[in-house]
Image (cartoon, rainbow, N blue to C red):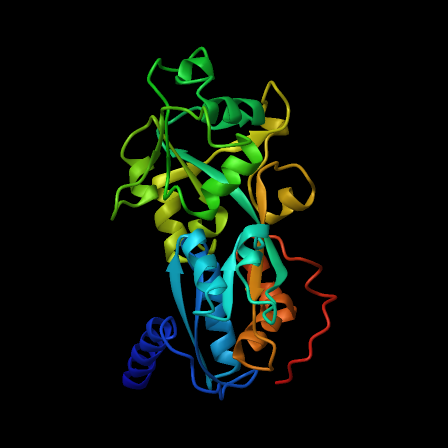
Amino acid sequence: MYNKILLLFVAIIVLSGCRHKKQQEATDTLVSGVITIVADENLQNILEAELDAFSVRFPEAFIFPQYLDERQAIDYLVKDSVKLAIVGRNLDGYERSLLPKTRVVNCYPFGYEGIAFIINRQNKDSIMSMSQIRDLLLGRISTWRQINPQSSSDTVKIFFASTQNGIMRYVADSITRGTENVSRNLYSLKEGENIFDKVASNPNNIGIIGINQMGNVNSRQYTQNDGKVRILRVSKEVGAKLEDTYLPYAGDVYNGDYPFWRPLYVLISETRDGLPRGFCFFLTQQVGQKVVQKAGLMPITDVHKIATRWTD
């Protein structure tokens, strides 16, 4: 335990120092060494599960993640403060223009995540259509009664973690088609607030999360979160009925029934066979893909058919 704490301290120093001076020649290998990586804070659960599986398989590898909002994580990668970032998008044209001509950032998908809308357990409106969700986010619908005539006239309040994270970028890009004219009832959490507690505190609240944030179905975290909130079932049809509504888990995403999902990517600027490349390969191959599947996310391919180069 002491050694791990010491290594974490060293990794933090390296991450902060590499912004100001060139790093010494790397000595890590595909399966050993010490590195720091960055990730979208919404992806902490899936990344921690992947890191646990990787460290069991390769005990001489020490990978220390720093969780940031998506924009910060990509900024660290672009500025060469780290060699690997776990996020929900590729670099855009402007970000690529900031890279030196000799530097290449490659992008590899490793999974697909359902975007979940969570509601208070006291709320009886547990199904919605795609169009109703979009209208809520755009402010065209503002009360529960507009969704269900039998419901209250209370205002629907929608919460998300941060304006800079990957979830809100997905909402802006894929649901509202921009950030203008969004609902006045859309709120970002204050520092220290938990989205599950926020939704559990008021029957009128809705939260937007990536499904990995619920935790693994068999975990204590999932049990705690599931006790606080329910996951909204969503239909592609205008008049949502229970039989044509679906949940943001891998099966419904794979079948094309659940409409809200995003790809997850490894962005890597490492060209040598170092630990960043080793972890990237792990994420996209058999063991890493099984971790993705176990977390309720959709793997990039059939985990039973993926060839693997790792040996026991």
Q: Write the residue at 27% across / 45% down.
A: 193
Q: Is residue 46 visible?
A: yes
Q: Is residue 267 above or below residue 125?
A: below
Q: Which residue is located at x 63 percent, y 57 percent? A: 299
Task: Specify the quadrant that holds the N terminus.
Answer: bottom left
Image quadrant holding the C terminus, namely bottom right
**Residue at the far top in the pictured view:** 149
Residue 162 vertical placement versus 86 (above, below): above
Position above or below: 295 against 204: below
Q: Is 259 displayed left or right of 123 in the figure?
A: right
Is residue 40 or residue 308 the one in the foreground? Answer: 40
Residue 255: percent from the left, percent from the top? 70, 42
Q: Is residue 10 left or right of residue 287?
A: left
Up the image or down, 246 lies above or below 107; here it is above
Position in image of residue 237 (x %, y %) = 64, 23
- Front residue (pair 273, 146): 273
Q: Position of residue 305 (x, y in %)?
A: 74, 66
Quarter assignment of residue 18: bottom left
- Can the viewer see residue 42? no
> How far across and how far down the image is residue 13, in percent?
31, 76
Question: How many discs mark residues in the rendered view?
Answer: 0
Q: For this rendering, which residue is in front, 243 or 308? A: 308
Q: Quadrant of residue 270?
A: bottom right
Q: Residue at x 34, y 49 (%)?
A: 224
